[in-house]
């Protein structure tokens, strides 16, 4: 990763495919403090002249044209399709994104346009989600047209990059700024992972990339040796980021502050089985007091990590819908699922305003 991008507070503005190498992606990132754009293409990263704020490349320049100062996407190029709500949900690319990021809830829209970048024809896909909780998030992907002539060929890029950017923004607004750091390149060279517990395990752990988590799209070689369970774990880990993932591993839950029940200072403690097998019930706290267990049933054949992420994403994106599936017979008194080995709460559940 270019030195300028390390440990920064960045959002992914656009992923743009290389005009010469299929499925090789550059990430245009915006510094959240200054709004200045950066890119990880050679042209941007190797230009050491001038200060970062004035550096540019053809990708940051097109991003500048497409995205205005308010972060809204402007109309450039030739429109191909525009759909929102129920119509958007029938779109293949929206469906794939929802499959890749289960739990994200709200009103989807999609817009597709063509335009040229540096005399090369490009196909832009803009996904937008207004969550039930009221967050507006977008993801923008630019495909080199010569490599992508069918909607099917764009599934992985859209579900991966645009879906990731949307999930990241939803998490950031919900109070998890560490989640959803822009992922590495689409294609990653796999290295062998040192065994857990060895000296190099943390230091030399290979960086996960989008290629390690995607499960949709025909561009993705699924013959990479990952089982669905490993892929789900990779997704959770890549999305949460090392720090938040380590917190989940250590305390076996993350707390989500309610938006809907803010006056009661409700907190959902989304728990995870240390053995990563069983489903654990969500503990509900009101003003710091543990009051109920919610049982959210896992769908068929879904790995445990996927189920956990799905509950987490649905609570931070569309709490109303997430809890509407919890019928009264799925609401239990405290300690309903730790009968044999009681798990007391030692860490306070503190409600925080979004
Ligand atoms: Zn660039």
Image (spheres, helix red, strand yellow):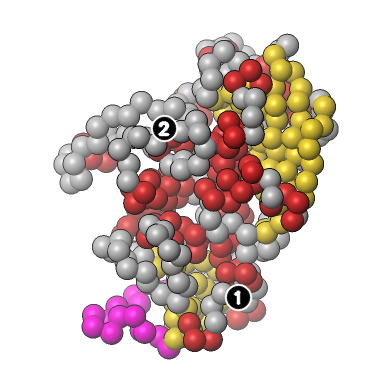
Residue 34, horizontal then vertical, whole percent? 66, 35
Residue 50 appearing in the image: yes
Picture quadrant of residue 159: top right
Mark carried by residue 221: 2
**Of callouts 1 and 2, which one flags the residue occurring earlier in the amino acid sequence?**
2
The answer to whether mark 2 is within 8 Å of ligand 1 is no
Mark 1 surroundings within 10 Å by alpha-carbon count, few (fewer than 14), some (14 through 19), many (20 or more)? few
Residue 180 shown in magenta: no
Height in image: 207 above or below 178? above
Mark 2 surroundings within 10 Å by alpha-carbon count, few (fewer than 14), some (14 through 19), many (20 or more)? few
Height in image: 279 above or below 35? below
Q: Which residue is drawn at 70% across and 38% down?
A: 126
Q: In the image, 341: left or right of 143?
A: left
* Majority secondary structure in the magenta region: loop
Assign the N terminus to one quadrant of the image. top left
Residue 340 shown in magenta: yes
Front residue (pair 24, 201) = 24
Height in image: 272 above or below 16? below
Q: Name the residue under label 1.
A: 324
Mark carried by residue 315: none
Q: In the image, 288: left or right of 17?
A: left
Height in image: 240 above or below 52? below
Q: What element carries label 1?
A: helix
Picture quadrant of residue 156: top right
Assign the C terminus to one quadrant of the image. bottom right
Residue 39, horizontal then vertical, whole percent? 58, 24
Q: Residue at x 28, y 29 (%)?
A: 191
Q: Which residue is drawn at 54% across and 20% down?
A: 22
Q: Which of marks 1 and 2 is in front?
A: 2
The residue lying furthest to the left in this view is 198
Boundaries of the magenta span = 333-348
């Amino acid at each position: 990763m270019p030195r300028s991008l390390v440990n920064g507070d960045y959002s992914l503005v656009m992923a743009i495919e290389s005009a010469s190498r299929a499925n090789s992606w550059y990430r245009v990132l915006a510094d959240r403090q200054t709004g200045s754009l950066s890119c990880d293409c050679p042209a941007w990263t190797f230009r050491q002249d001038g200060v970062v704020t004035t550096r540019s490349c053809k990708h940051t320049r097109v991003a500048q044209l497409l995205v205005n100062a308010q972060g809204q996407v402007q109309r450039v190029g030739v429109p191909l399709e525009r759909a929102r709500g129920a119509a958007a949900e029938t779109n293949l690319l929206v469906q794939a994104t929802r499959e890749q990021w289960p739990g994200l809830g709200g009103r989807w829209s999609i817009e597709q346009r063509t335009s040229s970048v540096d005399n090369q024809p490009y196909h832009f896909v803009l996904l937008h989600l207004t969550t039930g909780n009221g967050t507006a998030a977008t993801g923008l992907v630019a495909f080199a047209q010569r490599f992508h002539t069918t909607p099917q060929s764009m599934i992985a890029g859209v579900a991966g990059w645009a879906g990731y950017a949307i999930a990241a923004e939803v998490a950031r607004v919900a109070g998890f700024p560490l989640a959803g750091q822009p992922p590495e390149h689409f294609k990653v060279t796999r290295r062998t992972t040192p065994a857990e517990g060895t000296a190099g395990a943390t230091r030399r752990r290979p960086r996960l990339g989008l290629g390690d988590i995607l499960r949709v799209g025909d561009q993705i070689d699924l013959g990479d040796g990952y089982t669905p369970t490993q892929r789900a774990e990779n997704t959770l880990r890549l999305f949460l980021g090392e720090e938040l993932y380590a917190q989940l591993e250590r305390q076996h839950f993350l707390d989500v502050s309610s938006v809907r029940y803010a006056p009661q200072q409700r907190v959902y403690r989304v728990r995870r089985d240390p053995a990563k097998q069983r489903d654990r019930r969500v503990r509900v706290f009101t003003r710091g007091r543990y009051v109920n267990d919610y049982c959210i049933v896992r769908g068929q054949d879904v790995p445990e990590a996927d189920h956990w992420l799905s509950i987490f994403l649905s609570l931070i994106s569309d709490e109303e819908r997430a809890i509407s599936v919890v019928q009264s017979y799925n609401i239990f008194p405290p300690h309903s699922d730790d009968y044999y080995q009681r798990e007391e709460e030692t860490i306070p559940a503190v409600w925080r305003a979004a």
